[in-house]
Each structure stands twice: as C-alpha cells, then as structure tokens.
Image: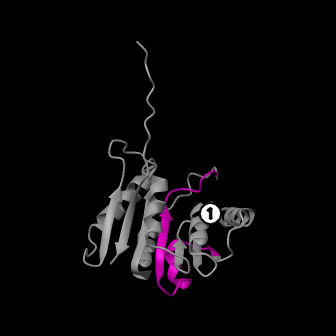
Amino acid sequence: TTSRKVKIKMIDLLSLHKQFILTHIKEGDICADFTMGNGYDTEFLARTVGMSGKVYAFDIQPAAVESTKKRLAEVGCPENYTLILDSHHNVRKYVEGPIRAGMFNLGYLPRSGRKEVTTMRETTLPAVKAALSLLSPDGILLVAIYPGHEEGRLEGEMLGEYFATLDRRKLCASCFRIVNSPTSPYFYIVESR
C-alpha cells in the first residue's frame, strides 16, 4: 500500500480578520490602528483608504513608531497616516470625528525582544470603549487576542465579558477562534448598525 500525506489547511485567523474589515472600509475613510507595532495593520489600513483617507496609529514604544515609520517609507505607503507616540486609551486627544474601522493587535511588539512590555487591561478597556464611542455607522472594530501569555489571556476574558454587555440593537459583537487550540490567537469583531 502507498500512503499519501494529506496537507490540512488551517484557518489563518489573522488574515481572515482583514476580510471582515474590507467589507466596511473604502477609499476616503478614517481609521485607527490602536496598536501600531511594526506597522503592518497601519499599512493595510492606509493602502485601503487611499490618499483621500486618513489613518491614526498609536503605540507607547518609540521603537514601534520608528519601525513603522521606516517600514511605511520603504514600502511606498501613501502618506495619509499620523503616527502617535501615546497610549491608545488617549485616542480622543487626537481623533475627534468618527472612524470607520479600528484595529487592536494586543500583546507585545513582535521581534522587539521585550515580551515584558505588553498591552495591559488597565488601558486596553478604556481604549476599546473610546474606539467604540468613535465608531461611525456601519463601522467595525477588530481586536486580536493572544492568550498564549497571562496578560493576553486575561485581556481576552475581560473583553469577552465587556462585549457581552453591549446593546445588540446598536452593536453586534462576535468572537472567532479555533476552539480546539486554546492558546492560538483569536479575535473579536464589533460592528455598528
């Protein structure tokens, strides 16, 4: 007998979340990347909204701002973004009007070597609440959770409890996760009606 190896395609949740966002945003929209990191989500949003749109990106680490600034320049990203060295919970100091989409990629700065510097519940919840208050009609907020470390697990639980309290006539909150892999990243989506 011959044996064949069957390659099973796993769902890539972190790519899937962009498909949800694309159903809500278009050229000219205003968006926010609440956890800039190395700028991948900032670039995705900036390219999607184009030169007539605007993206605000937040991070508390100077290394994240510098990494993102360098990356966006190297890849020829439209210059429709503002990089902000401040906590995402201070979004209202910088963004007045409604946003069509917001993205949170919680956890620590990838490839920084500083896993002890993570997003924290104390600022994540106020940031998510502020983001929801800025969300325009037919807007979307996406929050990626990384439960592989303790603070990430606790952030995910806290946000799940909070999202369950939202008025479903105004906001639809969903969770997408691989149920038989408890430490895999997962995400919440909140859509405004």
The image shows residue 85 at horizontal and vertical percentages of: 63, 73
The image shows residue 82 at horizontal and vertical percentages of: 64, 77
**Is 150 placed left or right of 158 in the picture?**
right
Tell me the residue at 55%/53% (across/down). Answer: 116
Q: Give the range drawn in magenta.
A: 82-111
Q: Is residue 96 magenta?
A: yes
Residue that carries the numbered disc 1 in the rendered image: 39
Residue 60 visible to the viewer: no
The image shows residue 58 at horizontal and vertical percentages of: 58, 71
**Is 134 placed left or right of 176 in the picture?**
right
Q: Nearer the viewer, residue 107 or 131?
A: 131
Q: Which of 30 and 124 is in front in this view?
A: 30
Residue 184 visible to the viewer: yes
| Image quadrant occupied by the N terminus | top left
- Considering the numbered disc 1 on the image, is that residue within a helix, a strand or a loop? loop
Q: How crowded is mark 1: few (under 14 residues within 10 Å), some or many (20 or more)?
A: many
Q: Please tell me how many numbered marks the rendered image carries.
A: 1
